[in-house]
Image (cartoon, rainbow, N blue to C red):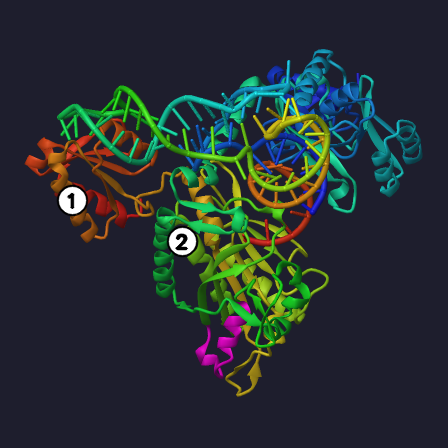
Amino acid sequence: MKTINIKLPDSTVKEVPYGITLYEVAGLIGKSLQKAAVAAELNGNLVDLSSVVTEDCSLAIITFDSEKGKEVFWHSASHLMAQAVKRLFPDAKFAIGPAIENGFYYDIDMSKTLTPDDLVAIEEEMKKITEEKLDIKREEMSRGEAIDFFSSKGEVYKVEMLNELVVDKVSLYRQGEFADLCRGPHLRNTEQIKSFKLLSIAGAYWRGDEKNKMLQRIYGIAFPEEKELKKYLEFLEEVKKRDHRKLGKELDLFSTHDDVGGGLIYWHPKGARLRTILEEWWRKEHFKNGYEILYTPHIGRSILWETSGHLGFYKDNMYSSMEIDGNDYYIKPMNCPFHIKIYQTSLHSYRDLPLRWAELGTVYRYEKSGVLHGMLRVRGFTQDDAHIFCTPEQIEDEIKEVLRFSLWMWKTLGFTDIKAYLATKPEKSVGEPQRWEKAQESLRKAIEWANLKVEVDEGGGAFYGPKIDLKIRDAIGREWQMTTIQFDFNLPERFDMYYIGEDGQRHRPFMVHRALLGSIERFVGILIEHYGGKFPLWLSPVQAILINVSGEQESKVKEIYAAMIDKGLRPQMDLRNESVGYKIREAVTQKVPYICVIGKNEAESGTVSVRKRGENNSVTMAIDEFYAMIMEDMESKR
RNA sequence: GCCCACGUAGCUCAGUCGGCAGAGCAUUUGCAUGGUAAGCAAAAGGUCACCAGUUCGAUUCUGGUCGUGGGCUCCA
């Protein structure tokens, strides 16, 4: 019998009979692997397990545990959902149904508008289909045949996609009575999808274009095992619990007032305290790291925005003008033109550079009402902006320095999992190619130097310059784009900026925009979710609540309070005529780091009974010992 | 802006298949002076988002407006 050799990922070679399926090969490697297999990578190509091997090859069995495995699994789950929808609503027409980062969706065009109850019915039908154990089979046909096939079924979206494909041959996957156009690969059988849940219904435009028809999108999630689904649903609960809008209200940090304008943040005393702590720290560190700090106006005349080009390419995001003495003024969507005006108040020598000018600049940008979201998506926000003006010789060090500063800042704030995204020159761009080259080189080198994980988006930069974005991962694994370091070849040209070089000639400076936290509003929103409202002591608006047991200790509590204020700490007293239990409970729900109870015993012995956040017991210690402990937490930024 | 859902006391939410509007917490007052997650009681608190329409009667049904939430697009 003819045999062939298969090379496995661990470099071992397996000899197998000619023409067996990859599913059978998986079985030869191990029974549990066979069971967990969702697809295979054959000579580097992702294929179905039903594929047969007819020549020597390298092979990796893909399971749900890998990114690729999840994609295949969720994609098959979306087909499963589509089949169930088609059974329940025969007039449903399908658009696209891909796997996404967390699960899958399918965009569907149908006469009935779906309700949450329908999702339950669809889930039940999906369950039935998995119990029917339908084989999922790949079929190939010519593009013309496929067009005829889907036309006959009234699948207009599939036909539209087929008409745009440039290939001759397409594949389609069939399970029972259902067939869908798909590149694949897919699971072998519907029974492999053991547990799933349909999560939400949303509107989505066909091809994401608001000129097109709005389709109904169903989002779902699926797993090979029930317990994984349970874990995921618990994760969603955790996300809900940490929602900064919910915590913002519970901890009395901020509010928004749609009656007087959505997307605008009102900082309550505790939120404002947190913001003040952050900003004071931010300023101190900027001075320490070679920056100067600027303040610039909130509005500027139209001529400024014409020169900067914002009235050309950014007008849609700017609010309409206001007339002052017959001139049009615009509220600023960015700080950069103002910083440039300051640059131009004097002639700069190469000896003056680099200039690092930072500003906590509040800007206003128009955002469509539907996208506003708590503090994360607003219409008025404060950028922790800075502009660096430097010579070509300096940019490499400058970029490294910005990156180092940023990474240090994230670490201090409690974020350590960081990834870089480099976006390079797009086809349409301004600025000389050599300058782009030099800028991109400096960005690449800085990333390499910082030893960061990086993803490169070739051609993904803005027309005016390349950039690095940093994405940070929060405590529950979500990624947020925060720091951005962006070159600008446009504004120095438009404003005709220059410095005098060593040669006595005029030279164009390099200009870099950078925001480390992004915006204060958005960052605080993320900080709330990252810590779930349990801020480390140095950021906590209230660090300790002082509780008296009875009226007799009132003066003692006031004395401790005054001493802590004097040390620059942030205590709060609770002298209300309530039970100790009651006051403790409230302090716990407020997530205050330390709860101090002062009763008769403590008052007499000069101690406090300290209960640390997250602990159910309390420790009695000398007052000075407590001060020392809290000062140390403050110092070490824990 | 568009699709779907939602909008009831300061907060969290019941409820009314069309007939005087409900709870818990918070607030105020009284009693209780209390030792580590809610002491007892009373009072007060609402044009049921807004504007029309249908109806003897609308918080409830219909239409519209505004807002919120989940998405689509864009981004800090």
Name the chain letter of the residue that bears numbered label 1: A
Marks 2 and 1 close (CB-CB < 8 Å): no
Q: Is residue A383 left or right of residue A367?
A: left
Circles 2 and 1 on the same subunit: yes
- Badge 2 sits on which subunit? A
Residue A5 lies in quadrant: top right
When the figure is inspected, residue A498 is found, relative to residue A386, above or below; the finding is: below
Looking at the rendered structure, the kind of residue marked 2 is Trp
- Mark positioned earlier in the residue sequence (2 or 1): 2
Q: Is B28 on the left-hand or right-hand side of A283? A: left
Callout 2: 10 Å neighbours few (<14), some, many (20+)?
few
Residue A10 in sight here: no
Q: Amino acid at mark 1?
A: Lys
Q: Position of residue A192 (x, y in %)?
A: 67, 18
Position above or below: B52 against A51: below
Q: Which residue is mark 2?
A: A408
Query: Magenta residues?
Result: A336-354
Q: Is residue A191 magenta?
A: no
Distance Cα–Cα, label 2 vs label 1: 38 Å
Image coordinates of residue A220 in percent, x first then y, are 64, 28
Q: Which residue is mark 1?
A: A558
| Residue beneath the point at 20% across and 38% down | A575
Considering only vertical position in the picture, is A41 above or below A253? above
Task: Let me know if residue A350 is in the magenta part.
Answer: yes
Q: Identify the residue at image location x=38%, y=42%.
A: A252
Is residue A343 something one can see in this rendering?
yes
Q: Position of residue A444 (x, y in %)?
A: 56, 58
Image vertical order of residue B4 relative to residue A257, above or below: above
Question: Which label was assigned to residue A295?
Answer: none
